[in-house]
Amino acid sequence: MRISQISLFALVCGAAPLAAHAGREVGINVGGPEIIVGSQPPPLQGEVVTPAPGQGYIWIRGHWAWHRERWEWISGRWDMAARPGSAWVPGQWVARGNGWVWMEGHYVVQAAPPPPPPGQEVEVVASEEPPAPIVETIPVAPGPEFFWIAGHWHWNGGWVWVRGRYDRHPHFHPGAYWEPGRWSRRGGAWVWHDGRWR
C-alpha cells in the first residue's frame, strides 16, 4: 500500500512538464499530451488535390508532424465531413515560449455571413496569413454566361475553405468576366478584397 502511494505521488508530481529528448518537452493538458518542439517546422509542401470521392467530403491539407525526433510530412487527404454544412479549420504549428506547439485541426459548422448593406462593402481582416489555395477541379460550365468563381479561404476566427462555384454574369456581354477576390497584406494583418463582375 505504501509503495503504491509513493508511486502515485511520483507520477502526479512528475506530470508537468515531463523530461524528454533534446529538442522537445512534453507537458500534460486537459486535451492530452502537448509536445513543444524546439525547432521551427519547415514550410508547407505543395500538394495536388485530387477530385473529391463524393459529396460531403472535405480536403484536409497536409502538414508537418514531429515524429522520432525529426520532421515528417503527413500528406493531405479527403475526409467525410462530420455534419452537413461543416467546414475544416486546418491544424497549425504555433510559436510558444522557446518552441512550437501543434494545434489540432477541427470541424466547425459553416454559417453563411450576413449580406452587406446595399452599396456598402464589408471589410474582413485576418490576423494570420491565409493558407495556400486548394487546387479545385473545375467542371464544365453550364452555359456561356456562366463564370467560374474560384474557392478561397475565408476568415471566421480561423481559416475556412469556401468552395468554388459557377455563377451567371448579371449583365452578360462580350468580354465579360469575373475578377477574383484576393487577400492583401496591410501592416501586420491580411485584408480581403471581394471579387467583382467586369
Image: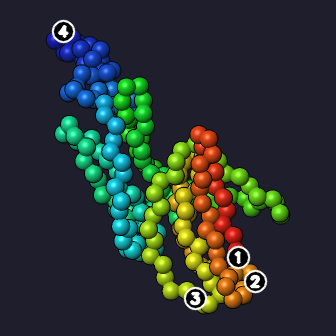
Residue at mark 4 to residue at mark 1: CA–CA distance: 80 Å
Q: Which mark is residue 198?
A: 1
Q: Earlier in the sequence, mark 4 or mark 1?
A: 4
Residue at mark 2 to residue at mark 1: CA–CA distance: 9 Å
Question: Left or right: 135 with respect to 21?
Answer: right
Mark 3 near mark 4, Cβ–Cβ under 8 Å? Answer: no
Q: Is residue 33 visible?
A: no
Pick whichever, 40 or 164, lies toward us. 40
Observer-side mark, 2 or 3, equals: 2
Q: Tell me which residue sits at (37%, 64%) in the image.
A: 78
Q: Tell me which residue sits at (50%, 86%) in the image.
A: 140
Residue highlighted by disc 3: 142
Q: Secondary structure at mark 3?
A: loop
Residue highlighted by disc 2: 171
Q: Earlier in the sequence, mark 2 or mark 3?
A: 3
Residue reaching furthest right?
118
Q: Earlier in the sequence, mark 2 or mark 1?
A: 2
**Which amino acid, by three-letter code, is at mark 1?**
Arg
**Numbered disc total:** 4
Q: Earlier in the sequence, mark 3 or mark 4?
A: 4
Observer-side mark, 4 or 2, equals: 2
Q: Earlier in the sequence, mark 3 or mark 1?
A: 3
- Report crowding for label 4: few under 14, some 14 to 19, many 20 or more residues within 10 A (C-alpha): few
Q: Secondary structure at mark 1?
A: loop
Residue highlighted by disc 4: 2
Spot occupied by residue 127 in the image (x, y as percentages of width and height): 58, 42
